[in-house]
Image (cartoon, rainbow, N blue to C red):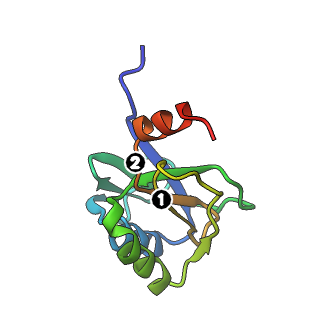
Amino acid sequence: MSQGLSHITFIVRDLDRMEEILTTVLDARKIYDSGENTFSLSLERFFDIGGVWVATMEGDPLPMRSYNHVAFRMAPDEYDDRLARIRALGLDVREGRSRVAGEGHSIYFHDHDNHLFELHSGTLEDRLRRYAQGR
């Protein structure tokens, strides 16, 4: 049986640019930088984001954008601040899907390598409780 999430890895062209996104928008803390050493497939950096191990590795970007994404939790009162941080980096903010009241708020944005991120203020329990109410 799986014991939960181990880590998330993003392949990026520019490790510095991705580090700026992770530290500025998601308050990531860098915990490892391979420097010129290659222990894995390429140069890499590790970050802690709210207790989640996020790895970035140097490589070719995704060929196109999709709705595949990773979502990080934010507090409801952080919405405006997080949106300002994303816009200050010149990232492409994507219009979120339509929502019903009570399932939380989201900000979607793409990085420079076509990864889609979401900042979401709700929980799974909030969403299931709201969906159980019907439209």
Quick one: label 1, few (<14), some, or many (20+) residues within 10 Å? Answer: some
- Residue 121, x across and y down, in percent: 40, 55
Q: Quadrant of the C terminus?
A: top right
Query: Quarter-wise, where is residue 110 in the image?
Result: bottom right
Horizontal and vertical percent position of residue 55: 41, 52
Q: Amino acid at mark 2?
A: Phe
Q: CA distance from mark 1 to mark 2?
A: 39 Å
* Number of the label disc, if any, that sits on residue 105: 1
Foreground mark, 1 or 2, reads: 1
Q: Residue furthest top?
A: 1
Residue picked out by circle 2:
39
| Left or right: where 5 falls relative to 12 | left
Q: Amino acid at mark 1?
A: His
Judge whether 130 appears above or below 57 on screen: above
The quadrant the N terminus occupies is top left
Q: Residues within 10 Å of mark 2 (few under 14, many from 20)?
A: few
Residue 17 coordinates in the image, percent (x, y): 46, 76
Viewer-side residue, 8 vs 45 = 8
Q: Does label 1 or label 2 sit earlier along the sequence?
A: 2
- The structure residue drawn at horizontal position 28% and vertical position 51%, both measured from the top left corner, is 50
Is 8 located above or below residue 64 in the figure? above
Q: Residue at x 34, y 55 (%)?
A: 46
Return the residue nearer the eye: 79 or 55. 79
Q: Where is residue 60? Give x, y as percent.
A: 64, 62
Residue 58 visible? The answer is no
State left or right for residue 79 relative to residue 58.
left
Kindly tell me whether residue 97 is visible in this rendering: yes
Secondary structure found at label 2: loop
Locate residue 101 relative to residue 75 in the image: left or right. Answer: right
Q: Residue at x 61, y 67 (%)?
A: 113
Residue at 25% x, 62% y is 29
- Contact (Cβ within 8 Å) of mark 1 with mark 2: no
